[in-house]
Image: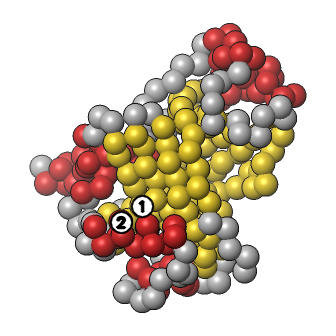
């Protein structure tokens, strides 16, 4: 399997919207975009955290710096299928992502105390973070249906639309499927705009015309808060 060790540095903004807003926006900007390599896909994220959820609690409370560790796949992972093991950091609005591609088997072997998937610089950074947080374990799974596009004029501009976001805080193996508790309201879509630089005028104008505005939104953060709320409800 070819390996892809990747470093991203970009600005990411999130826009919750309705399907009607989404359709209106795409009718304006669709001719400027083309689907990315994955096109429409089910994104599966396995978030790693401490038993007391230190990483996500720090992320929710943080003002200028936050980070997350996760394993991502497109579609439910298979033992020898490709997954991405990554650390995502956000500092003063800029996102820094460092990740390696490996197999599900190798990353789970590593998470269970086995050898590292490879000995790259990025893997050493991931290993340092794992040791710093005292080897966080699988804590949450978040799934969604994603439709992703790149700008025809600027390949650094990427726009994604996530639907049917759902989460669970148990049953972390692929054989349990991709079911979970819905995070979004029915008919709600989460758009993300990711760019290395400023937003082009044509996109800014389209957002203004559709009355679409950015909002802070963390899938893992909101899922965690809903999970904690449900646990408190169980105690009442």
Comparing 171 with 195, the one in front is 195
In the rendering, which numbered label is found on residue 69? 1
**Residue 228: image location, x then y, percent:** 25, 50
- Residue 180 left/right relative to 113: right
Badge 2 crowding class, 10 Å Cα cut-off, few under 14, some 14 to 19, many 20 or more, is some
Q: Residue at the location (66% across, 48% down)?
A: 146
Q: Is residue 177 visible?
A: no
Q: Is the C-beta separation of discs 2 and 1 under 8 Å?
A: yes
Q: Quadrant of the N terminus?
A: bottom right
Closer-to-camera residue (132/176): 132
| Residue 12, horizontal then vertical, whole percent | 55, 36
Q: Earlier in the sequence, mark 2 or mark 1?
A: 1
Picture quarter containing residue 132? bottom left
Of marks 2 and 1, the one in the foreground: 2
Mark 1: which secondary structure? Answer: strand
Q: Taking 108 as reference, is 207 above or below it?
A: above
Give percent across and percent down for residue 156. Answer: 71, 39
Separation of disc 2 and disc 1 at Cα? 8 Å
* Above or below: residue 150 compared with residue 114: above
Apparent side of residue 71 relative to residue 54 in the rendered image (left or right): right
In the rendered view, would you say 62 is above or below 69?
above
The numbered mark at residue 40 is none
Residue 153 visible in the shown view: yes
* Residue 217, x across and y down, in percent: 44, 36
Q: Residue furthest right?
A: 31
Protein image colouring = secondary structure
Question: Mark 2 falls on what kind of element?
Answer: helix
What residue lies at 71% left-to-right and 44% top-to-bottom? 148
Q: Which mark is residue 129?
A: 2
Task: Say which residue appears at 48% left-offset and 76% top-offset.
Answer: 173
Toward the front, the furthest residue is 121
């Amino acid at each position: 399997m070819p390996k892809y060790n990747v470093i991203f540095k970009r600005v990411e903004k999130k826009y919750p919207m309705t399907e009607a807003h989404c359709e209106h926006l795409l009718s304006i900007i669709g001719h400027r975009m083309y689907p990315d390599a994955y096109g429409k896909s089910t994104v599966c994220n396995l978030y790693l955290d401490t038993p007391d959820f230190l990483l996500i609690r720090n992320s929710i409370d943080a003002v200028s710096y936050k980070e997350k560790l996760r394993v991502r796949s497109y579609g439910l992972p298979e033992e020898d299928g490709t997954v991405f093991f990554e650390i995502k950091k956000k500092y003063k609005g800029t996102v820094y992502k460092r990740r390696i591609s490996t197999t599900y088997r190798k990353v789970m072997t590593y998470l269970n105390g086995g050898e590292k998937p490879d000995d790259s610089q990025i893997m050493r950074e991931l290993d340092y973070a794992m040791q710093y947080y005292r080897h966080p374990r699988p804590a949450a799974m978040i799934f969604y249906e994603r439709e992703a596009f790149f700008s025809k004029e600027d390949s650094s501009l990427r726009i994604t639309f996530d639907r049917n976001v759902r989460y669970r805080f148990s049953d972390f193996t692929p054989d349990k499927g991709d079911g979970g508790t819905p995070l979004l309201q029915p008919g709600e879509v989460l758009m993300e705009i990711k760019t290395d630089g400023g937003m082009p005028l044509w996109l800014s104008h389209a957002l203004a015309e559709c009355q679409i505005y950015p909002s802070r939104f963390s899938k893992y953060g909101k899922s965690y808060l809903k999970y904690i709320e449900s646990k408190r409800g169980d105690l009442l």
